[in-house]
Image (spheres, rainbow, N blue to C red):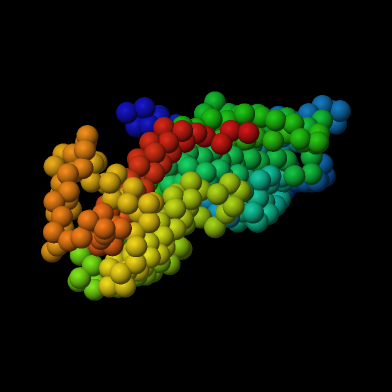
Amino acid sequence: MVHFVEKKSAMKERMKVEILFLLAHLLNGSFIKSACGQTYSDVTALKAALLTGYDRDVTPVLDQTSRITVNVTAQMYTLQDVDSVKGSVVIPLSLFCTWIDEKLRWTPSNHGNVSMVKFFQNEVWKPPLALSSPIEFTFMEQKQMHVMVMNVGLCSMQAGDVIESSCTFNLKFWPFDKQMCDVSFMAYDIPSSEISLNFAQYPLQLFFDGNSEWFVDDKTYYKKETLGFTELVFRLYLSRQSGFYVLTIIIPTIGLSVLGAMVFLLPHESGERVGFSITVLLSLAVFLTVIADNMPKTSKPVPLLCIFLADQVVAALLETVFVILNWMLYQRAEKGKQIGTFYKKIVLFTSLRCGKGRKIADPNIVMEMTENKIVENRTIDDDDDNNGMTWKDVAAAVDKIMFVVFLTNAIVPTAMFLGYVTTSAQLNES
């Protein structure tokens, strides 16, 4: 609602400016000419008289020790592009400037009642405003545009261009980041001792709320002195609309990570465990290749989302490794190797954790376990060193542990990442 009111107020101000321009043109139009008697020769003679002895390279004040005051309004029309990696923002804008030219004054009654004339911008003095935060140097000037001059010496001009201004972005919280971007202007070769740059009554007018990726949260403006020159700074506060990245990057990555953990639920007899885990790993790798163009290519600082994605890739690699190693444990049942104490503890741990009365059985052994004791019903020799356990039991126990570990890795880091970046993203004010 606040943005709507500001936009409506800015539009009203722009309408006022346009009405003033229209009235100025009407003053020089045919209707006024006929009413007041001004003619074409009156206007041309006045312009020639005003330019006689006029030097556009000299500041138009009679006392050259004083400063000329220029009031500036910036009108920004659209947020065309924001490149957070390159550190730039592209905005079509115009600067509306007013000042008093003490050399361009006349009495209308002495010149056919002509009260306003216009000159091309390269014919008279004008403030040499240039973008002071450029990616590409931009001078705010259009030779085909005019400077409107009233008989009291009041001059006004409007110069526009599509500017590309440099900004410093902090991509740590990408794509939930909030950024601050400054667009600043200065009188290129006139120090502040000769020119006083000031803001007009409405210094910054925005005719947009953002674009498809960015939203303008707020705006402000201020002046600063840099090496003896005055800069007018117009600041935009931007926040990224992250819905696209959540749907195309974060959710698919979480889905692939959960799917990778499911490999430990597949039975060893299926023979598809290794192939399944490799397929998930390749799917994640291909997916990251596709989205690489949308990810910021910066290391200062590294976006937290990149660290999160790297964690999921490493997890997929480890899943493949553990699937292969666990398959080796499962195959030891055919080789008759003894089960070590470490593996026995893993089986006992998972059996106790899975509930009371959990049974481990194979064709020859039935072992019933409780929290307080182990009751063995043996049908083979009591001298069996494995105490009724088989390597298949060990492989099943490892599967349970790995499933819990990798499923936790797929869920907990995601919750921590989303919670942190959405609550900690701050504007990069420096």
Residue 288 vertical placement versus 217 (above, below)? below
- Identified at 82% across, 41% down, the residue is 58
Question: To which quarter of the image does residue 385 belong?
Answer: bottom left
Query: In which quadrant will I find the N terminus?
Result: top left
Front position in the image: 372 or 30: 372
Query: In which quadrant will I find the C terminus?
Result: top right
On screen, residue 2 versus residue 119, left or right, reads: left
Front position in the image: 36 or 215: 215
* Place of residue 30 in the rendered image (x, y in percent of width and height, measured from the top left): 48, 46
Return the residue found at the far right. Answer: 65
On screen, residue 298 versus residue 369, left or right, reads: right
- Identified at 26% across, 54% down, the residue is 387
On screen, residue 218 versus residue 410, left or right, reads: right
The answer to whether residue 264 is seen in the rendering is no
Question: To which quarter of the image does residue 136 belong?
Answer: bottom right
On screen, residue 216 versus residue 254, left or right, reads: right
